[in-house]
Amino acid sequence: MSQERAVPASAVPLEEISSWPEELCRRELPSVLPRLLISFIVISTWRGLWEILKIIVEMFLPHMNHLTLEQTFFSQVLPKTVRLFDDMMYELTSQARELSSQNLEIQSTLRNILQTMVQLLGALTGCVQHVCATQESVILENIHSLPSSILHVIKSTFVHCKNSESVYSGRLHLVADLLQALFKEAYSLQKQLMELLDMVCMNPLIDEHDDILNMVVVIHSLLDICSVISSMDHAFHANTWKFIIKQSLKHQSVIKSQLKHKDIITSLCEDILFSFHSCLRLAEQMIQSDAQDNADYRLFQKTLKLCRFFANSLLHYTKEFLPLLSDSCCTLHQLYLQIHSKFPPSLYAAGISKVQQEEIAGTFLVTLSPLISQLLTFQPFVDVVLDSKLELPCELQFPQCLLLVVIMDELSSRSEDVQALWCTESQVSEATARVSLLKAIFSSFEQCSGELSLPVHLQGVKSKGQAEVAITLYQHVCIHLCTFIASLHPSLFPELDTALLNAVLSANMITSLLAMDAWCFLARYGTAELCAHHVTIMAHLIKSCPGECYQLTNLSILLRRLFFFMAPPQQVEFIQKFPPKETENLLLWQYISFQALPAELRKQTALEVSRAAIAWCMKWLGSNRTLEELESLVSVIGQPYVQQTLSLLLPLLGFFIQALDPQLISQVITLQTSLLKLEPPDHVRLAFLDFLSSLGKLFIPQTIQDRILPSLSSVFASLLADRNWLLEQHSLEAFTQFAEGTTHEEIVPQCLSSEETKEKVVSFLEKTGFVDETTAARVERIKQEKGTFWEPFAEVIQEETKMSSLQPCVKRARHELPSEDEYRSTLQAAIAALEAIELLLQKSPPPDWLLMEMETLQQRIDKLKRQVL
């Protein structure tokens, strides 16, 4: 043996060790490895550390016992390796600002650091490859330092590469080649690590606490890496997610309670939204180009497939871990809303072509659609969707309505228990309550004012022998609501009745109409007895209304419609229960169409109603005919009663205008002139216009023209000047109809009292002054209007909700008749006041205004005397 070989192995220089053959390395491992490890720990230069690490990995690692790798190598080397990598990364970031083509020293330093980092990642790759090559299955505890260390440097590398544009500030080209090599090495290292982790075995029957925690750390570290690389490499990003889902499911039985499911679901939903929005941006870019023959379209398809992959991953994960996802339900709910808020027909959707809409719907949305089915029986999801305090921004209100419709469709084939979960209200916690699905659908529908007024169109329902056509949002909700009602379990009918009645009584007209349509479907779909029961309820509610109100109007419309669906035997029973010959039922019968009755029954009922009404009119005419008694005579009661009567009488007079006496016409126009000074309500002014428009067909005799024409021009001038847009439109229409038909042409210019009115009429006649609004402009306007009007309207709805209950109104206190003593004491007080004035007149001259006030007082006394008589 040579003298050199006689030197103890522990004293051999590193340069010589690096040239040892494999067999010598294996034999000298016990004596050389401790020295190398000590040197690695004490040495401080990056290059020296890298050289020692390279020797250990390349020459001695293959000969180490794989069962003791953690103790003998990984735990001693990897912590300092990570610190070394972090130090180099810090140095890179710190000196990158000094990088320039002129500063060759900094350029050389940074390139050397990057080169060392590439080599360091290569050494770690060697560690992973060795473990994979020597073991068929891996126990994580035996290598637990390796995955965590590698994931740390991988993430650090990817973050640096992602931020390289800003870090190197326009001088990236000087180090671009090495950064690319660094990324590739990290990419290769992660792929190798995932192969290694795929070999890990965890026995579900053994509580290996450290192994469980280590695997959880690995999964969440990969999750962090996903958030970094999402915009860097789509394929790599998808593969990382695939691995996360695979490992989570593989070790589900032992790690499910330790995983941070909310973090995983949140990250997955964020990536879905990011990819979806990328799809929409690409689709918008393709509108002006040949969509089937450019790079954008190929990228669009690639991104769309990524969306589908993420959707499948979410479905798979949700299905397996559903019981543990209670705190992720809000995220899943928001995911659905956010997606549909950006997709047609939402007002806030991206402007994409029909072709791309169909591709996205057929590839991505159809993949995601089973998510709602999976969540349907999960109570925390129900609580989130039906939260009584749910407040959504304008752009998410329409998607919420669509979601509730989808849920109704899903529930149609579900059991009574599942339907009850969604259709019954519940107090989830002290601060949170859950409303019923039926109440929620009406509330959500009410919030879609913009989508209803545009209106947006949705995919229609196919029927036999007919092509599918687009339908409005109203039709869409109505059809699916009726389908759901048809499938509803009978035990839930009380909830249905409550929701429908609340919606019918809504101040929102379109919501009330939807509820009426659904109720009419129920009347047709249900039994004759059920329909009769509902009609009876409506009748009692109408009779209990304290006076004219929008609730009474809504109930009367519904009663009229439901009465048509009653079977003749039930109609007979209704007539017996509410006989029209009794005056207290006349209020009810005014809302029922005789056309709903069979011929014989119609004749009999109409006769009874007529007799009762005539008898009551005769009674009233034979009395003192006080204003208070007019309330019992006029069926559509309002305040004040005279104006309400006029609003009904004037259109009728207009209809019979040719048969009216000219003196009566003159009196009516004079009355209108007087009433306009009192600023009557809009419905009375509209009645004025109905009457005035009919005058164009009338020739006014010469003898009374001087009385009628000036008043007529004054009334028209006043109504044409009204600022209310509805009255303004009707005034223009009525005036045009009058002007085109009248033979008294001289009055037409007299009605145009100002230049503004003239211009308004001319613009109306010539159909000028209108803005030709594009579809895009109209959508934008509706969005702005919805945002402006929704906030105050939401406050009204919230207040209505607090007050809304189907409990009967508190009975009004009975008004006791005043006693004789009250009359006497009040009169004595008036006498005392007059005596006091008399004393004042004896002391000083009266003020100028006293005489006028006394005349007014005398007029009031005369009026009181007439009432006493």
Image: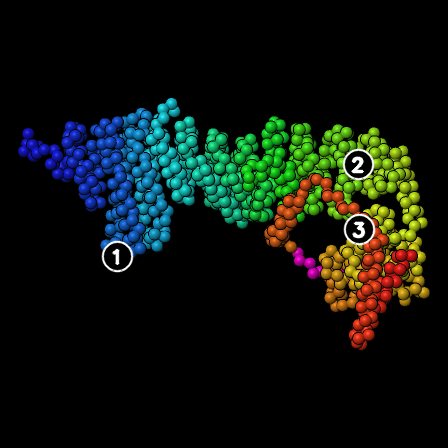
Q: Which of 423/55 is in front? A: 423
Q: Nearer the viewer, residue 753 or 104?
A: 753
Left or right of 23, for residue 405: right
Query: In this view, which residue lies farthest toward the bottom?
Result: 845
* Picture layout, residue 568 above or below residue 440: above
Q: Please provide percent x and percent y for residue 662.
A: 92, 59
Q: Which numbered disc flags the more N-terminal residue, 3 or 1?
A: 1
* Three-letter amino acid code of the residue under disc 3: Gly
Is there a contact, CB below 8 Å, between mark 2 and mark 1? no
Q: Position of residue 210 (x, y in %)?
A: 33, 31
**Contact, CB < 8 Å: mark 2 with mark 3?**
no
- Circle 2 sits on which residue? 563
How packed mark 2 is, by other alpha carbons closer than 10 Å (few <14, some 14-19, many 20 or more), is many
Contact between labelled residues 1 and 3, with CB atoms less than 8 Å apart: no
State which quadrant residue 403 falls in.
top right
Residue depicted at 53% across the width and 39% down the height: 333
Range covered by the magenta-colored residues: 765-772
Residue type (three-letter) at the residue carrying disc 2: Phe
Residue 527 in the image: above or below residue 296? above
Residue at image position (59%, 32%) is: 421
State the mark number for residue 638. 3
Q: Amino acid at mark 1?
A: Asn
Q: Looking at the rendering, in which quadrant would you find the N terminus? A: top left
Quarter of the C terminus within the rendering: bottom right
Callout 3 crowding tier (Cα within 10 Å): few <14, some 14–19, many ≥20: some
Q: Which mark is in front, 2 or 3?
A: 3
Q: Residues within 10 Å of mark 1 (few under 14, many from 20)?
A: few
State which tag comes first along the sequence, 2 or 3: 2
Residue located beneath label 1 in the image: 103
Q: CA distance from mark 2 to mark 3?
A: 25 Å
| Residue lying farthest to the top in this orientation | 205
Image position of 822 (left or right of 33): right
